[in-house]
Image: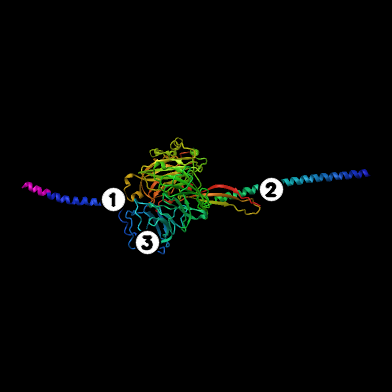
Amino acid sequence: MKGLFLLIKFSLTVLVLGVPLQLMAAKTATGNAAAATGSAAPAVSTERYYQLQPDLTYRPLSHPLATNHSFCPKPRPDTVPLRYHDSSGKPLWLQLSNESGQLRWFGDTETGAVVSGAPPVALTETAVASPLLLTSAVPGGVNTGVAASPEVIWHDLAANQYQRADLANLHAPRLRWRWSVPLAQQSPWLQTPVLQRWQNQQEVLLINSATAATPRLWLLQADSGKMLAEFDLQHYASGQQPPAALGALKAAPAALDLDGDGAFDRVYQIDEQGQLLRLDVSPDLSYQSALVADLSARHAVYVSPLLVVRAMLPGNLATVASRPAVDVLVLLAKSQSQYQLLVLFLADDISSPLLVSDLQQADFAAQTQIPAQTAPAAAPNQFMQLKQGRAGWLLPLSGQPVWQPQLIAGVLYLPLQSAAQHGLLCADARQANSLLALHLYQATAVYSQAELDINMQLPLRLAAAADGSLQLQQSKDGAAVLEGLHGVSESCAGCTEKLNLAQLSQWRQLAIYRQEEVY
Amino acid sequence: MQAKGFVLVVCLCFIVMVSAMAFSALTISQLSQRIGMAGQLQTQRYLSMKLKHLQQLQQLSAKPQAGAGSISCPAQLAVWSEPQLQCQLLQLQSVASDPDDAEPWGTLLWRTDLTVVVAGGVS
């Protein structure tokens, strides 16, 4: 009897405690599932959708077309937030993203999306590109936030066309032009248009064809969408017999203005396999192309936008080129799950393409700890033993790059995210765990470590403190990420110095001369 | 009588000749002095115009000049990636106020213009 009573009591205890525990467990499981798929939930309910009408205006849609529910519900850091004033003087902010070819914006008043006529094509993985945000009055110097008439140029992947729209009135976006890519794409690839200046100060777009069969570069007038030129890149001076075939051009190109006339005259292109082309473009739109680097032996994929700058090499690297001014290219490559950072120093008079074997492995940089403002950072003479006319270094990265590399006074910054956070949807584009900061020419640490362990939310912005020193901040809340930024110094090969705004924003004398009258 | 007259004429001629030589010597020295002064004056005007031009350079506003053309920044060691650092090219010319002034001076300038936000601002 006593045993029966104990059995009943035990059963009641199990029932009383077990049910809530089961409920809690179920709730926790649901919560985890929600957390795991929380980002994958449909975007916020206030999101508006617009469809292009025959009169080239966008009208609100009561029922959006089929949209990709894996879109990030928060602003991606694809563009830096723009602060501007509307016609009534009300301050507003605007941030854009382009996921899978669908333009979305995030602002003070509402969240919006411009959808194409057909649902976005099915993609194997999330495709992201940077829309171009243009304003009619971008302030110079200190960003006071006074801008007007924001316009955007983006790649609509579903229709495979580029469009420019006026977003001054977010309730009624207005299409200014659209341009259809003249070639059919076997596999869709979302691209970032590149804005450059051409002759007579006109702005042009550089657009790649992402197809391997017909590698093309198109030049479009940014104002009208009219095509100015089409460059066929299939045949180039490679120095090889027979010339290697160029692959798909998926990385956004980069351009340089070498003579300072306000028009670009050099373009760099890299195909998916790593063949780097240089195009020297004349004012009459004729061009010469040459293969300047062949990095295809690494079996890496090159799809990230190129970054190119014109730089003066320091004295210890003077043997790299016959002239101190070279083109510095910063590339990101992915080999299986490993990301790599490559920096190439390309002289004007390269006779044969740069190869992977010409690059210096700089994997020690992540472990090197060099205090700031010390000279020379890490035995630069031992590091850069490079061939005449070609040089560079590569660095395997410890995580995934989540922002384009930025050069600030000769120091290369790259936010990285550890592999542990890769699986989180949307977080991969907004959060970084560490910041890589390297001397551009030596690949050595500029601060306490080459890879600084800093949790940050992207995008970042450059800000000036009250004393004129520069710092990197989170755009969202102005929280400091890295204070007291340093820049490369000319005093020695590995030296750095603290940057100050007053020293950077000033007039510098190039030449003084007498104006003699000619009779 | 004729001999005395001849001597008188010769003396007169000698006096005239010496006077002419002395006058020409004085004239030449005066001319050379003037020429020397002209050179000095030209140097003075040259320096004054240069000084005026340099003073204008010092008075140049630290702010970006409206209408100055934006260019790609020249190659430098501490290189920046655009669009963080923009450059402007400016040609500054002095204007001669007097037609007799020396030729004016000109200067080719470029300005680095860093786009930053002020601390504490939120974009």
Q: Which labelled disc corresponds to residue B38?
A: 2
Mark 3 Cα shell of 10 Å, populated few (<14), some (14-19), many (≥20)? many
The mark lying in front, picked from 3 and 2, is 3
Residue appearing at x 26%, y 51% in the figure: A33
Residue A157 pos. (x, y %): 38, 55
Q: Is residue A262 magenta?
A: no
Mark 2 Cα shell of 10 Å, populated few (<14), some (14-19), many (≥20)? few
Could you tell me if residue A276 is visible in this image?
A: yes
- Highlighted range, magenta: A1-10
Numbered label tally: 3
**Circle 3 marks a residue in which chain?**
A
The mark lying in front, picked from 3 and 1, is 3
Q: Is residue A328 left or right of residue A122?
A: right
Is there CB contact under 8 Å for labels 3 and 2? no
The residue where tag 1 is placed is: A36
Residue type of the residue flagged with mark 3: Gln
Q: Is residue A4 magenta?
A: yes
Residue type of the residue flagged with mark 1: Ala
The residue where tag 3 is placed is: A51
Residue appearing at x 47%, y 50% in the figure: A232
**Circle 1 marks a residue in which chain?**
A
Residue A465 pos. (x, y %): 43, 48
Q: Is residue A29 left or right of residue A66?
A: left
Pick the front one: A82 or A477: A82
Asked if labels 3 and 1 share a chain, the reply is yes
Could you tell me if residue A484 is visible in this image?
A: no
**Circle 2 marks a residue in which chain?**
B
CA gap between label 3 and label 2 equals: 80 Å
CA gap between label 3 and label 1 equals: 31 Å
Pick the front one: A222 or A318: A222
